[in-house]
Image (tube, helix red, strand yellow):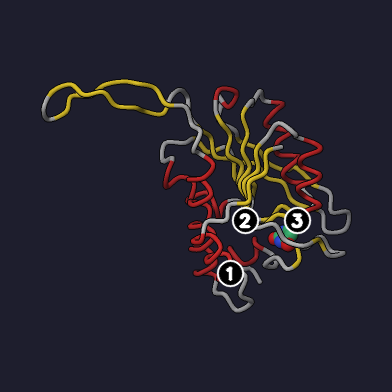
């Protein structure tokens, strides 16, 4: 698996703000979207271009445009929705393929409960978004599901990754790319990332 910890100063600054215990729901939402946007910029540097032309003010001029069927964004419910708009800032025509997977709080195992994918997902780059790569269970289950539908190119964007999640994801899906804004220390007994930022879903939705 190709792993990129994106160390852009803007990302590091915003990640620092995101970790504050006293952060408001509004600010957490804004920062998750902004960091999602910056990660998307990094994750799309290799999108293939094709040569074409347009009528400019002084006649026909050559331009380049992104080739092919382009992208589907895959937010993993519910916390992935917090990064989705950041991806769409750069890829406003992307199709959205929603996957619902929750983590059983006792077994920590992923439980799929919803999926509505772009019908031509097998021809698109899938950009999967979920703020926290903890055990990796939800991300692995989502990518299993995308591959079952014929998806061939997959990039995952997360805000914080635990070493345990990175190892599990890399073992299950060595062919994907992972972009993270931070690699933290470890998981605690409850499956939370340390130091992490707490429960990203609750912070995004204001449910705690
Ligand atoms: N999910 C979260 O929201 N936070 C963690 O630390 C781990 C999983």
Give the left or right position of residue 122, taking residue 190 as reference. left
Callout 2: helix, strand or loop?
loop
Q: Is residue 158 visible?
A: yes
Secondary structure beneath dot 3 equals loop
Residue drawn at x 75%, y 42% is 112
- Above or below — where is 46 with respect to 163? above
Quarter of the displayed picture in which ligand 1 can be seen: bottom right
Which of the 4 image quarters holds residue 56?
Answer: top left
- Tag 1 residue: 16
Task: Measure the alpha-carbon separation of dots 1 and 3.
Answer: 17 Å
**Label 2 crowding class (10 Å Cα cut-off): few <14, some 14-19, many 20+?**
many
Of circles 1 and 2, which is in front? 1
Which residue lies at the image location 72% right of the left edge and 26% below the top edge?
A: 148
The CA distance from mark 1 to mark 2 is 11 Å
Rendered image: mark on residue 162: 3
* Camera-nearest residue between 51 and 90: 51
Residue 78 visible in this rendered orientation of the protein: no
């Amino acid at each position: 698996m190709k792993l990129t910890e994106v160390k852009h100063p803007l990302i590091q600054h915003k990640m620092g703000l995101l970790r504050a215990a006293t952060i408001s729901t509004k600010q957490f939402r804004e920062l998750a979207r902004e960091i999602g946007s910056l990660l998307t910029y990094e994750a799309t540097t290799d999108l293939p271009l094709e040569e074409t032309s347009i009528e400019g003010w002084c006649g026909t001029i050559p331009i380049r445009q992104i080739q092919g069927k382009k992208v589907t964004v895959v937010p993993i419910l519910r916390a992935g929705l917090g990064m989705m708009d950041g991806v769409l800032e750069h890829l406003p025509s992307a199709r959205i393929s929603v996957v619902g997977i929750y983590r059983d709080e006792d077994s920590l195992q992923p439980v799929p409960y919803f999926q509505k994918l772009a019908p031509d997902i097998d021809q698109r780059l899938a950009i999967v978004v979920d703020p926290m790569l903890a055990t990796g269970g939800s991300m692995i289950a989502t990518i299993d599901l995308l591959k079952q539908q014929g998806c061939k190119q997959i990039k995952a964007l997360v805000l914080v990754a635990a070493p345990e999640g990175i190892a599990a994801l890399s073992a299950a899906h060595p062919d994907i790319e992972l972009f993270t804004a931070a690699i933290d220390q470890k998981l605690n007994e409850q499956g939370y990332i340390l130091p992490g930022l707490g429960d990203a879903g609750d912070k995004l939705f204001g449910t705690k």
